[in-house]
Image: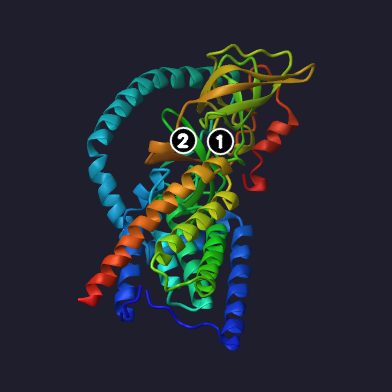
Amino acid sequence: MGARRGPALDVALVVVLLLVHFTFHRFFVRWPVTPNLLVGGLLLAALRLTAGQAALLGFVLGVFEAAMGLEGMGTISLVLTVVGYLAARSRDLLFADARYFTPIYLFAGTWLAELGLLVAMPGGPGLLAGLVLAPISAAGTALVCGAVDFVVASARRF
Amino acid sequence: MRHINVGRPENQRRDHVIVAVLLIISWALASLDPSQTLGLTRVLRASVLAPFLAADAVYEERAGLARRADQLNSERDYLYRELQGAADLERENRDLRALMGVPDRQSGLFIIAELVPGRPAVGDSHSFLLRASSLSSLEAPAGVSVPAGLVGVLRSTGGRTGLGDFWTHPDFRVSVRSTIGNATGIVKAAEEEEGTVLMLVEGVPYEARIPPGTILETAGLGGVFPPGIRVGRVLAEADSRSGWSHSYLVEPAVRPGAIRAATVWSRPAAIPSEPDLPASGQTSEAQRQAEDPGDGR
């Protein structure tokens, strides 16, 4: 986290995560527990955006996600707007330069987003399933997105 | 990731305004009917999301080619058998109507359309898109079915695209009758404790009993669904209101998950004046309202 990277590399990292999410959308929604690259990308983007920009990105991604899934346009955009805003705000409250900040931040953010979607979207697997499945999904997101972020940061140093 | 400083008060005020506006827009979108957001969905799917959907379609086409070939073969055989029986029935029906002096039956048209199921981020899909060149002339709501049975209802159309709900949607209702003609009722989705979705037929008159295994089909009331579309098979009695009505659990004829093509019923210009009443004549006003096109269902 200590490395200073150019914005282009950060943008590329987020764009790749979002492209992978939308390209393999059918697989990510088919299985109950998968890394949520949409939320992961949003959370990583929120690290270098203002709260308003992060909320706007969350809103747009929510609309895209709903258009892909054909359901919950307002609900998903609402949840991701809130998550984007809170993510951008929370990094100032937490120790953002701590070594383990990014994985913990990704885990907590994804869990929050998935819980929000489970509560807000009708017909989901239920809150109890959300309390079991969502943390696993959040851990997967933290692992994948954290690893990608670490690799990009390492590559930047060299 | 590199972090930026957002601590300045003017930035925070601006952010709060942006977030408030976005939340209001989201809230407005959430309160809209899905058919009202169809335009935005269609624009996004035809522009920004088009490459992803195209890649998805290529994958699905290749992955499901062999399966589709088998399915089409079995559907063709099934339709051939049905056609053989239907030709005789049609002739008998025509002869009987001629004898009774009843005008020809107007059954409407069935439009074949490509069905694209939704893939929501949470839970199972209850909605689908339909694509067909002749959808623009169709009046929604309209019943959607496959040869095996009922799939759902088309809620709205715009151009060559339509948005509909599977029968698993919580708002879905259809009036049914038993094929042996002894009972009628209203079918809706019912989720079991194990998470599987079955159907529940409610409002069955108390004096009418439906034995397990009985086939239910659409009653054709209200002009949304044609009569005679297979809905499901009765499993067991679910509830009984003493002196009033029964409800039964129904195994659906069609599980919507794997369907990629369906037919939409285009009702005839003038619904036949003779009502398609069930044989028992036990039709209530509530059943008519359940399929009333006026409420968008």
Residue A96 horizontal side relative to residue A126, left or right = left
Q: Which residue is mark 2?
A: B145
Q: Position of residue B49 (x, y in %)?
A: 37, 62
Residue B293 falls in image quadrant: top right
Q: Provide the chain ID for the residue under circle 1.
A: B
* Contact, mark 2 vs mark 1 (Cβ under 8 Å): yes
Question: Up-down: is A31 above or below B189?
Answer: below
Q: Quadrant of the C terminus of chain B?
A: top right
Q: Which mark is residue B55?
A: none
First in sequence: mark 2 vs mark 1: 2
Q: Residue furthest right?
A: B243
Q: Amino acid at mark 1?
A: Phe
Residue drawn where x is 37% and y is 66% of the image: B47
Residue B231 horizontal side relative to residue A100, left or right = right
Q: Which residue is mark 1?
A: B225
Of labels 2 and 1, the one closer to you: 2
Asked if one can make out residue B288 in the rendered structure from this viewpoint, the answer is yes
- In this rendered view, identify the residue nearer to me: A19 or B284: A19
Residue drawn where x is 38% and y is 52% of the image: A140
Identify the element where label 1 is drawn: loop
- In this rendered view, identify the residue nearer to me: A18 or A130: A130
